[in-house]
Amino acid sequence: MSIRVLFFASLSDITGIRETSVDAREFTDAISVFNKFAEDFPALETYRSSALFAVNSEFARPASPVQDGDEVAFFPPVSGG
Amino acid sequence: MFQLIRVPIDIQKIADGLQKPEDGALVVFEGVVRNNSQDKAVRFLEYDAYESMALKKIEEIGSRARNQFAIRDIAIVHRLGRMDIGECSVAIIVASAHRGSAFEACRFAIDTIKKIVPIWKKEFYEDGEVWIEGAH
């Protein structure tokens, strides 16, 4: 019963985490996962309004549901090209 | 052809693989590493990606380009990792019977890459390094 959690770019630098997992039973939506890490890493708060969320490699809203087996990713606005 | 790679992009090879006798236009866009950013001298860049999603989004952009513009085919290759000044970070090649739709599709592809593909560049200066974040 786990959700895979990924951080990229500056959000990965803040948390020191690229990839981890959390207990799926404790979370219902993407923002609840973000909130857990924002408690552990308060500097994430500076990204609360700008961070992009993805669930299973698709852009998601904060309220998008998450469940066992899902992959949730948090990252800043993209800058490729 | 849609790829994320960690070696220099061979544009000629991609173009040769894409082009067919019925094409009248081949539009090539190269994004290259610039030696300055916001008045600071840039030494080199590093690109990082959420690779599975980035590839999925690049494929989506390719499909949308083929559906929305009268082109025959499109290739998009983005390089990841460290790149020096002048190196190619992204290549888009569009093959089409006529030039107009090829230019339009190419412009659409690079503009959309910069908006929705989860890739980030980090600029390295003499006195530090910064992740670049796009417009939200």
Image (tube, coloured by chain):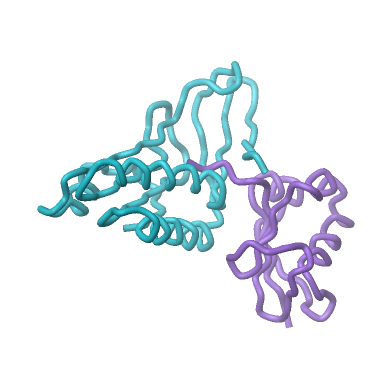
| Residue drawn 63% across the image and 30% down it | B129
User: What shade does chain A have?
Assistant: purple
Residue B39 screen position, x and y as percent: 59, 16
Residue B88 screen position, x and y as percent: 37, 36
Residue A13: image quadrant is: top right
Quadrant (top left/top right/bottom left/bottom right) for the N terminus of chain A: bottom right
Residue B91: image quadrant is: top left
| Residue drawn 25% across the image and 41% down it | B99
| Residue drawn 53% across the image and 52% down it | B117
**Would you say A74 lies left or right of B16 here?**
right
Residue A70 screen position, x and y as percent: 66, 75
| Residue drawn 83% across the image and 66% down it | A32
**Would you say A45 lies left or right of B19 here?**
right
Relative to residue B64, is residue A24 depicted above or below? below
Return the residue nearer the eye: A29 or B102: B102
Relative to residue A4, is residue A45 depicted above or below? above
Query: Hey, which residue is sitting farthest left in the picture?
Result: B21
Residue A37 screen position, x and y as percent: 82, 59
Q: Which chain is cyan?
A: B
All told, the count of numbered labels is 0
Return the residue nearer the eye: A34 or A12: A34
**Would you say B57 lies left or right of A46 here?**
left
